[in-house]
Amino acid sequence: MSMTTIVAATAGMVGLSSLLGAVLYTMAKKTQGDGSDEKIELLTNLLPGNNCGACGMAGCAAMAEALARGEAVPQHCPVATIAQIEALSQALGLSNGNVNRTRRVARVRCGGTRGLAPRRADYEGVLDCRAADLVGKGTKACVFGCLGLGTCARVCPFGAITMGEDGLPHVNENLCTGCALCEAACPRGVIAVFDASQEIFVRCVSTAPGKQVRSVCEVGCIGCGICVRVCEEGAVEMLGHLAVVDPDRCTACGKCVEKCPTDAMRNILVDAGVAVGVAS
């Protein structure tokens, strides 16, 4: 090897080392100078730590990074408590003015237990409601009702949903955070998130005519409209064949519940306290 080659190679190594050194120095300045790593770690520790993804991100660490970059605010975490939101806001130097929010919980809009809603077929396949819905619309005669395979319970990261022997999911509202992962997983919209303060709700999502509903379920909404007529607050309306309650107008007087001929209209507080989806 000639002297010229050795000098050129040495010069190249020195140049490469200098370039790498400059890159490392720049990276160190970026992370060390603004304390971003420490800030992200702090924010991660202040978040609930469930990594449920209800915020739409990969987990709490990803949410912390978004908070640190100013791409999210603490209220974007749907499962954080008010105390956690206040702590996050303080760490970010944000105002604590609007951290109060209505508590939301999941509720089951189907009363079709095994004894009240007959099956029309057997299902053999993946134990997932979404899969069963794609295969002949499941086993229930009612093609709107709960499929009963427990997908909502499996996606709940808080253990708030369990499947009952009656074939319906039951929600423990003491554990429910209102993250809505169960709502997103249900192919029929049977389980949905409501304001916890809403007492009256319709335990049915069927839009079929009354005669068809009666043939497949004893407790479905038949669209008779009695609830609309007895409500003095105008809080109940018919959307097609299905009754819907406006929580802003409802005073929970219970007249619609009392007059409903199929028991589809229910008062959650009277029914079961913290557990829903239970048929009487």
Image (cartoon, helix red, strand yellow):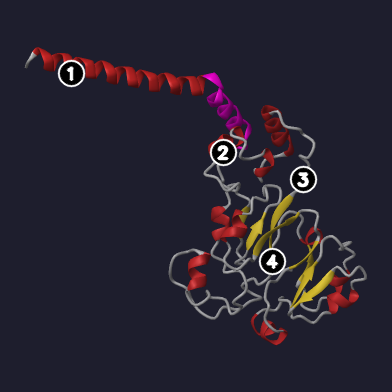
Tell me how far mark 3 sits from mark 1, CA to CA: 66 Å
The main secondary structure of the magenta stretch is helix
Tell me the CA gap for discs 1 and 4: 75 Å
Residue 163 placement (x, y as % from top left) = 59, 60
At horizontal 58% and vertical 80% (from top left) the residue drawn is 141
**What's drawn in magenta, residue-wise?**
33-49
Contact? badges 4 and 3 (CB < 8 Å): no
Dot 3 crowding, Cα within 10 Å, few <14, some 14–19, many 20+: few
Tell me which numbered mark, 3 or 1, is placed earlier along the sequence.
1
Q: Nearer the viewer, residue 16 or 239?
A: 16
Is residue 245 or residue 67 the one in the foreground? 67
Residue denoted by label 1: 9
> Residue at the location (66% across, 46% down)?
78
Badge 2 is on which residue? 60
User: Residue 159: percent from the left, percent from the top?
Assistant: 60, 49
Q: In this view, does 141 lie above or below 4?
A: below
Task: State whether residue 193 is above or below residue 9.
Answer: below
Residue labelled with disc 3:
101
Residue 31 percent coordinates (x, y): 50, 23
